[in-house]
Image: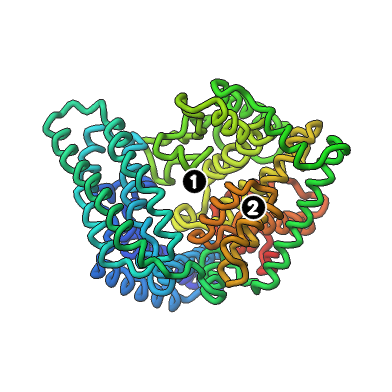
Amino acid sequence: MKLFLVMAFTTVCAFGQNWDALAERFFAEAYFPYSPSAGTSAGLHQYDGKLEDYSKASLAREKSTLHKMLAEVEAFPVAGLSASQAADRELILGAIQSSLQDLEIIRSLETNPDRYSSTASNAAFVIMSRKFAPAAERLKLLIERERQMPKLFTDARTNLRNPPKVFTEIALEQLPGIVSFFETDVPSAFTDVKDQKLLAQFKTANTAVIQALKSYEIFLKKEVLPKSKGSYRLGEDTFRKKLLYDEMVDIPLDRLLKIGYENLRLNQQRFKDTAAKIDPAKTPQQILEEAQKDHPPADGLLDAFRNTLGGLLAFIEQHHIISIPSKVLPVLEETPPFERATTSASMDTPGPYEKVATEAYFNVTLPEKTWSKERIEEHMQGFNRGTIISTAIHETYPGHYTQFLWVPSAPSKTRRLLGASSNAEGWAHYCEQMLLDEGYGSTDLKLRLGQLQDALLRNARYIVAIQMHTGNMTFDQAVDFFVKEGYQTKAIGTMETKRGTSDATYLYYTLGKLQILKLREDYRAMKGSTFSLEEFHTNFLKQGFPPIKIVRKALLGNDSPVL
C-alpha cells in the first residue's frame, strides 16, 4: 500500500511538471513572440527590442502556432493535475480560443485601423514610462522598436478590408494625439541622455515613425474612410463565444440581458430614493447638478485625492475590509500628456515580473492652464467630491492597486499573466459599492448618489453591449439609452457608444460585480457564523484575476452557477 501511494504521488507530480512545462511553452512560443509589448509590460525584458508583426506571413505563423498549442492543451489529461493547474489549463484554453477568434472570425486587423497606430504608441510607452534600465539603454531599445514601426503601416495598407466607418473615424480622431506623442512626449522622456550618436539615431528613427503616422492618416482619410462600409456588430454567436472565451460566462444572452435590466432598474430606484432623502423638493437631476459643483479648486485636485487615500486606508483597516500586503502608497501624479484627451484617471502598475521599476502610478488629469474658466469648471465638475471618492476607491484602495499588490501571491505564472476583465474591472467596480455598503461616508448621501450614477453608467454599457452587437439596438438608440436610462449627458453617451462598437464586451464591469456579489453570499452561506468579509476578500485576491468561475471553484470547491 505504501509503495502504491508513493507511485501515485510520483505520477501526479510528473503530470504536474509536464503541465507546467506546457504552460511555459505557451507563453514562450504562442504568446509573447506575437505580443512583445505585453512582454515588456509584464517585466520580461527579453522582448523589449521586438515589435508586433502584423504581416500576413507572421499572422499565418501565429494562427498555426495557436492551433497546434490548442490541440496540445485540449489533449492534456486533467487527471493528475492539481485543482489550480486544472484551472490554469482552462485559462490558457480560453486565451488561445480568444486569440484565434480575433484572428479568424472578428479579424480586427482587417477591420480596425486603430490597432496599428495604437500598437505603435503603446510599444513606445511601455519602454519610456518605466525606468527599468538607465535612460540610454532604454533609448537603444526604443530605437530598435521604432525602426520596425513604419512596417506596421505598410502591413495596414495590405490588411485593412472594409472597416466599419466608426472604426476609421475613431482611428482618425486618435491619430493627431499619437503624432503629438511621438513629436513631444517621447523625446521629453529621454532628455537625460547625452550620447549624441545615440540621440541622432533616435531622431532618425522617431522622425520616420512620425512621417509614417502622418502618411497613414492621409491614407485613412483619402482611401479607407470612403470605403468604410463594414459592420461593427459581432453577431449573437460571436458575441456569445467571446464572453465564453474571455470571461468563462456561458449564460444564454436573453437571460444575461434580463439580469442586466433587473440591476439597472434596481440602481435607478436606489438613485431616486437617495435623491429624495437629500431633498424631496428637487428632482434627482437637480441634486446631481448641485453635487457636481462641490469640487476642489483646480490647483488642489491632486491634494484632494492625496488626502482621500489616508481616510480610505484607515477605514479599511478599522473595519477589516481586506488585508493589504504593502504600506507603500502609489505615486500620485498628473496624467501623461498623450493620455489626457481620453483618460480622467488611471492606475499604472508594474508587471508581475518587473524587478526594478516597481512604482505604481495613480494618474489624475488636471485641467490645462490654457483652458477658459468655463472649460476648467466643466472639467472640475467631473471631479466633484463624490467622484473623487469613487475614483480613488476604484483605482487604489481597495480597487486596482490593492488587487495588484496581491498578484505575486497568485498560484502560478499563468495566473499572474492571464486574467479576465470581469475580475479586474468587476472587482474595482464592486469595491465602489461595497465600501459604502460597509459604512464609508455613511453620513453623506451625495457620495451614494455619485456611486449610483457610476453604477448606472456601467449598467448602460452592459445592456448596450448585448443589444448593439446582436443587432437589436442602433448606434443612435444606444446613445439615447445612455442618456435616458444611464443618466449620462449626450456627450458621454456618444463617447461610450463609440467605445462599445469595438470594446464589444464592456459589460464586464457590472457582469463582474454581480458575480462577485453572488460569490460573496454563497461563501457566506458556506461559512455560516465563521464568515469574515476580510477573509473572503483576501482569499478572492489571492487567486490572481482569472474569470470568476475559477475563483468560485477555488473558494467553494464546486462548479455552481456564477449568476
Q: Which quadrant of the figure has residue 193? A: top left
Q: How is the image coloured?
A: rainbow
Mark 2 residue type: Arg
**Residue at the spot x=80%, y=48% of the render?**
270
Q: CA distance from mark 1 to mark 2?
A: 29 Å
Q: Which mark is residue 135?
A: none
SS label for mark 2: helix
Q: Is residue 428 left or right of residue 50?
A: right
Disc with the residue nearer the chain's start (1 vs 2):
1
The answer to whether 147 is drawn above or below residue 474 in the figure is above
- Label 1 or label 2, whichever lies nearer to me, is 2
Question: Residue at label 1?
Answer: 408
The image shows residue 280 at horizontal and vertical percentages of 88, 38
The image shows residue 237 at horizontal and vertical percentages of 54, 76
Label 1: how many Cα within 10 Å (few below 14, some 14–19, many 20+): some
**Circles 1, 2 touching at the beta carbon (< 8 Å):** no
